């Protein structure tokens, strides 16, 4: 596949190279050619401390290159490793920004982008079965403007909810390393800091999301119950911000096909945890 190859965005028809360059018109791309790029864990720590808004934070995240293995993987999927059914589509191939309401009272914390889902569409949970399931649930609960998610720019809006992840790049086998998780952690820490004043509850999708929230809460100086609350579907724990506010942490099985196709996670189970946020 030639480096100069460009493909039409499935919604807008505009041509893009893969991975997508900032400021080339991708719907919702928060970065510009001037957005500072993190090349190391130290850079992530430094750059995550500076954004004053969630949009600025998103911009920095989407150009990050701090994890060599993940950069190589996300870009190789975007060029030579595309799923056959998407072979004629441009792939985002960059870290994926948080998506949703900047004034959210509820944060949803997943795991990492899917190689042919968000790594293709550039938007959290968009373009795969997990996202179809998640957004249908958020629509039923009144958080999403439509039950489907097709591509960035499809008109989907979230109200009161923001979706984020502890790892922003698609990992091989959906398994980020411990080092990659810790390198990416400052982005989540800063997001918690910026959302904290309005935050009411956090929904962790799966054990990795649950543990990432607890670790981030501890780093932020929040009170976390001891012993550490255990993850299971429907688990709940009260986290306490430094100013004494209680934030409800709720656990749900991840919305992966592995859980939703097998009936381990049903719509009724998911609707019930959403009702507690
Ligand atoms: S996983 Fe996080 S820290 Fe690593 S390259 Fe992606 S955005 Fe950067």
Image (cartoon, grey):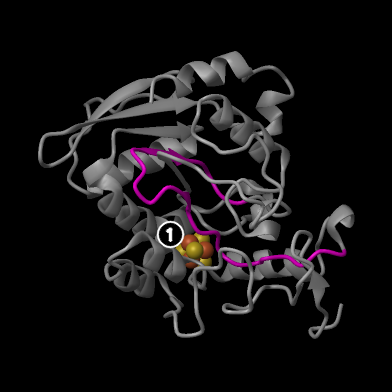
- The yes-or-no answer for disc 1 within 8 Å of ligand 1 is yes
**Residue nearer the viewer, 14 or 45:** 14
In the rendering, at what x and y percent does residue 3 appear?
Answer: 79, 84
Give the image quarter of residue 68. Answer: bottom right
Q: Is residue 4 above or below residue 58?
A: below
- Tell me the quadrant of the picture where the N terminus can be found: bottom right
Span shown in magenta: 88-113
In the rendering, at what x and y percent does residue 226 appear?
Answer: 21, 26
> Does residue 106 show up magenta in the picture?
yes
- Number of other residues with Cα within 10 Å of mark 1, as a class: few under 14, some 14 to 19, many 20 or more: many
- Tell me the quadrant of the picture where the C terminus can be found: top left
Task: Answer left or right for 231 relative to 77.
Answer: left
> In percent of the image, x 44 and y 34: which residue is there?
204
Mark 1 lies on a secondary structure that is helix
Task: Answer left or right for 49 relative to 39.
Answer: left
> In percent of the image, x 53 and y 19: which residue is there?
271
Give the image quarter of residue 261. Answer: top right
> In percent of the image, x 68 and y 39: which residue is there?
148
Write down the residue under mark 1.
184
The residue most toward the left is 243
Count of numbered marks: 1
In the rendering, at what x and y percent does residue 183 appear?
Answer: 41, 62
> Does residue 247 show up magenta in the picture?
no
In the rendering, at what x and y percent does residue 37 appear?
Answer: 45, 79
């Amino acid at each position: 596949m030639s480096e100069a190859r460009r493909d039409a965005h499935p919604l807008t028809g505009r041509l893009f190279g893969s991975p997508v360059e900032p400021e080339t018109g991708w719907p919702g791309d928060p970065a510009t050619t001037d957005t500072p790029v993190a090349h190391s864990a130290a850079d992530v720590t430094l750059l995550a401390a500076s954004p004053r808004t969630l949009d600025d934070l998103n911009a920095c995240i989407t150009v990050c290159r701090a994890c060599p293995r993940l950069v190589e993987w996300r870009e190789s999927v975007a060029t030579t490793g595309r799923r056959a059914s998407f072979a004629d589509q441009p792939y985002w191939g960059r870290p994926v920004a948080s998506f949703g309401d900047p004034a959210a009272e509820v944060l949803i914390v997943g795991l990492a982008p899917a190689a042919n889902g968000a790594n293709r569409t550039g938007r959290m949970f968009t373009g795969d079965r997990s996202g179809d399931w998640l957004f249908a649930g958020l629509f039923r609960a009144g958080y999403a403007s439509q039950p489907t998610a097709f591509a960035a720019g499809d008109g989907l809006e979230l109200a009161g909810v923001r979706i984020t992840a502890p790892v922003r790049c698609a990992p091989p086998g959906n398994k980020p390393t411990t080092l990659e998780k810790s390198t990416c952690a400052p982005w989540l820490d800063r997001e918690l800091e910026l959302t904290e004043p309005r935050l009411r509850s956090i929904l962790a999708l799966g054990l990795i999301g649950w543990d990432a929230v607890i670790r981030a809460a501890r780093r932020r100086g929040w009170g976390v119950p001891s012993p550490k609350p255990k993850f299971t579907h429907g688990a709940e724990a009260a986290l306490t911000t430094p100013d004494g506010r209680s934030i409800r942490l709720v656990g749900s099985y991840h919305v992966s096909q592995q859980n939703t196709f097998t009936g381990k996670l049903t719509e009724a189970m998911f609707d019930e945890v959403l009702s507690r946020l």
